[in-house]
Image (cartoon, helix red, strand yellow):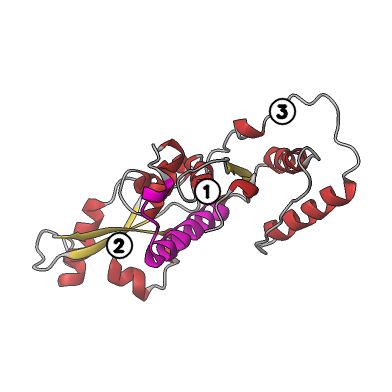
Amino acid sequence: SAEGQGFGLAVVEAARLLDEAAPAHTVLSGEVASLANTDPNLIERRGPMLLKGLVHPVEICGVLPASLTPAILEFPASLTSEHRFPMVGRQTEATTLQRRWNDATNGIGTLAMVSGEEGIGKTRLVRELAQHVHDQGAIVLYGACNEGPEAPYAAVGQALAQAVGLDPALQMASKSEGPLSAVIASPHATLRPADDRAPYTSGDQEDLFEDVANVLRRLAVRRPILLIVDDVQWGEPD
């Protein structure tokens, strides 16, 4: 080292990685990330890089700033309402949803499905919960299925697109290619006829599901998340 207290490839590699790190950011090699058993949800893999003084490229990773609290997202515009009267007659259902939310905030991920006849107040019930948890600082993501042909998982893409500014890896995915990128762009994509659309392969689906789960895990480290998918009845069964 410059102080004469160390030498060898490890010291050279560390010095070069330090040069690559922006202020207040952490950079490490893929090997160190594996040896340290670092949470994969907090690792941003940047690919191999040839560093000065080293013969072989080094796999570079960045550590996502999990300790930084993201800005609170605005309440989804699609859920805003001008209701002037409080909701009545849904105390049992509201209590059930609140109990599920409490489980989620205690680390127990949960799924709740709200069903009923058209116009019975399903969205209003969910909106009340969403407004309550948003007021407490939670991240509320909202997407809706639409009647007629649309891109696969478009409702999920609509919801995730709202969080692009909160997650560096999600932001990178929105500017690259792949299943997650296609889903984020899907609400704004021009659709081909339904019988002309290439379906996702099983491998694409597995990658997509894993990517979405990782995004939600990273965001949940910062704030609790309520993900709402509305009008599921219009979603295609496949």
Label 2 SS: strand
Amino acid type, mark 1: Val
Q: Residue 207 sits in which quadrant?
A: bottom left
- The picture places residue 186, in percent across and down from the top left corner, at 43, 43
> Which residue is rendered at x = 61% and y = 35% of the image?
76
Residue identifier under label 1: 156
Q: Earlier in the sequence, mark 2 or mark 1?
A: 2
> Which one is nearer the viewer's eye here, 4 or 223?
223
- The picture places residue 142, in percent across and down from the top left corner, at 59, 42
Which mark is in front, 3 or 2? 3
Confirm or deny contact between disc 2 and disc 1 (CB under 8 A).
no
> Which one is nearer the viewer's eye here, 204 or 41?
204
Looking at the rendering, the stretch of residues picked out in magenta corresponds to 194-221
> Which residue is rendered at x = 15% and y = 65% of the image?
57
Residue identifier under label 3: 81
Amino acid type, mark 3: Ser
Residue identifier under label 2: 28
